[in-house]
């Protein structure tokens, strides 16, 4: 960042009043969470193995349980791990095993989603608090001395900066939150579809 731009940002931050410090913390937390989640989803995308999933389902439908388990034995695909759990318990608590495995995958995928959701709500409220404190400072300065005009305008500036910062953080957090929520919903749908397909394949495999 150029020195002049950095100085302007620092000056704007200081003019925003004390509420800018919790807003800064909220912004840093949001950046860290978004970066971590995006990297996690990139790793998951690299682990997806639809061929192994399809091969496992085809083998299960043919009644070849060894081949079905072997197809997903070493796969890091979340869907493959759920199939692996289902195949391991195909003669017993199939539904329970699949539900436990799916819950573990979804719990990992949903990590920190609640943090982002909280920031979307918290940041505007902090900005509103800065607005209130800034306006209160302006009213307290009215009629105090010859510098009252400068204090009033400074209080109004503090209110506007805090409001803008809070809204900016909320907007910047809302977009990745929606993207991550959509990815989570998609993964949940994939896990449910795979579990249902495996259940049908196992039934056909037993009948064959």
Image (cartoon, rainbow, N blue to C red):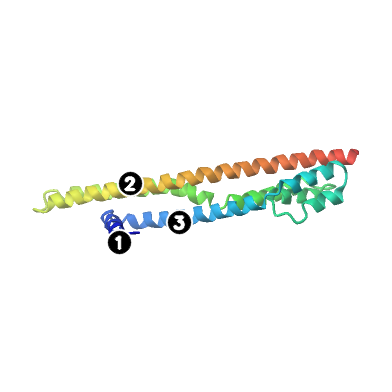
13 or 44, which is in the foreground?
A: 44
Q: What's the residue at 90%, 38% (across, down)?
A: 207
Crowding at label 3, few (<14), some or many (≥20) Cα neighbours within 10 Å? some
**Which image quarter holds the N terminus?**
bottom left
4 or 154, which is in the foreground?
A: 4
Residue 105 position in % (x across, y down): 66, 51
Residue 28 position in % (x across, y down): 43, 57
Residue tagged by mark 2?
164
Q: Which secondary structure, mark 1?
A: helix
Q: Which mark is residue 29?
A: 3
* Mark 2 vs mark 3, CA separation in Å: 18 Å
Q: Which secondary structure, mark 2?
A: helix
Quadrant in which residue 20 is drawn: bottom left
Q: Which secondary structure, mark 3?
A: helix
Farthest-out residue, right: 208
* Mark 3 vs mark 1, CA separation in Å: 25 Å
24 or 93, which is in the foreground?
A: 24
Residue tagged by mark 1?
3
Q: Which mark is residue 187?
A: none
Farthest-out residue, bottom: 3
Crowding at label 2, few (<14), some or many (≥20) Cα neighbours within 10 Å? some
């Amino acid at each position: 960042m150029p020195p002049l731009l950095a100085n302007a940002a620092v000056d704007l931050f200081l003019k925003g009043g004390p509420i800018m410090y919790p807003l800064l913390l909220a912004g840093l937390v949001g950046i860290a969470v978004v970066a971590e989640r995006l990297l996690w989803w990139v790793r998951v995308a690299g682990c997806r193995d639809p061929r192994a999933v399809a091969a496992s389902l085809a083998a299960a439908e043919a009644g070849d349980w060894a081949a079905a388990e072997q197809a997903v034995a070493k796969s890091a695909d979340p869907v493959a791990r759920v199939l692996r759990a289902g195949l391991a318990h195909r003669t017993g608590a199939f539904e329970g095993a699949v539900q436990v495995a799916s819950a573990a995958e979804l719990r990992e995928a949903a990590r920190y989603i609640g943090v982002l959701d909280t920031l979307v709500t918290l940041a505007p409220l902090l900005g509103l608090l800065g607005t209130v404190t800034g306006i209160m400072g302006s009213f307290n300065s009215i009629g105090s001395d010859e510098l009252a005009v400068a204090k009033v305008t400074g209080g109004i500036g503090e209110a506007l900066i805090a409001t803008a910062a809070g809204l900016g953080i909320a907007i910047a957090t809302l977009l990745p939150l929606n993207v991550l929520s959509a990815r989570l919903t998609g993964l949940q749908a994939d896990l449910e579809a795979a579990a249902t397909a495996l259940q049908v394949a196992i039934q056909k495999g037993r009948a064959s």
